Amino acid sequence: QITLKESGPTLVKPTQTLTLTCTFSGFSLRTSGVGVGWIRQAPGKALEWLALIYWDDDKRYSPSLKSRLTITKDTSKNQVVLTMTNMDPVDTATYYCAHRPPWGTSLVFDPWGHGTLVTVSS
Amino acid sequence: NFMLTQPHSVSESPGKSVTISCTGSSGSIASNYVQWYQQRPGSAPTTVIYEDSQRPSGVPDRFSGSIDSSTNSASLTISGLKTEDEATYYCQSYDRSTYVVFGGGTTLTVL
């Protein structure tokens, strides 16, 4: 059974850097084709993809947020870390991490973690 | 940038069928697979369709997906609607420049 869990601060101040950790089980980031992605959802808004890291350390970022994002993995700890710099109140959202299965060529995310709500406020 | 456009909301009665569309802004939506996610209030999204028309195990066959190249659209059809199908549904695909793209979501009301 694959599970993912997001962790990190629930409140950050404007201009600060957000660091979120996704801790997973049931799969390995050493497996060819596997990836872990980050997706966020502002209150009442649609899903927005942020970043994705693959088993081979290939990294992809949302073009609109690329300058602010860094995604890394620690295979030995089964963790993926996302950092987002220069946080702003518009970045207030629930942040999800999700598993990218190794099968097929589609970019499906399944399953997802429960998400963590991050509020940006002074 | 590549975008996926969905209707904001749809509604239908229990037992009926409903189709939710997802239209690509450019290129051919048939060139890259489309996924559909269901999100109930307060919960994380779950996959109901992947690779245009494939159902994950555990998803009832009332859910089906298709591609219409003539309208550059993907569709999610839910037949035999149940009140438990009330949720927001998101399509998602891939684009070489934007990479992962989500639609704006469609809220389904079963009344």
Image (cartoon, coloured by chain):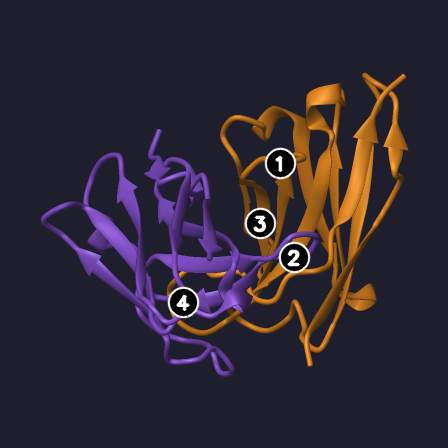
Chain colours: A orange, B purple
Q: Position of residue B54 (x, y in %)?
A: 35, 74
Host chain of mark 2: B
Host chain of mark 4: B
* Residue type, numbered disc 4: Ile
Q: The N terminus of chain B is located in which quarter?
A: top left
Residue at which label 4 appears? B49
Q: Say if residue A88 shows up in the picture.
A: no
Dot 2: element: loop
Mark 1 and mark 3 on one chain: yes
Residue visible at 50% across and 65% down in the picture: B85
Looking at the image, residue B42 sits to the left or right of residue A45; the answer is right
Residue at which label 2 appears? B44
Q: Are marks 3 and 2 in contact (CB under 8 Å)?
A: no
Give whichever of A90, A83 is nearer the camera. Answer: A90
Q: CA distance from mark 3 to mark 4?
A: 20 Å
Q: CA distance from mark 1 to mark 4?
A: 23 Å
Q: Position of residue B52 (x, y in %)?
A: 31, 64
Residue at which label 3 appears? A52
Q: CA distance from mark 4 to mark 2?
A: 16 Å
Residue at which label 1 appears? A44
Looking at the image, residue B64 sits to the left or right of residue A45; the answer is left
Host chain of mark 1: A
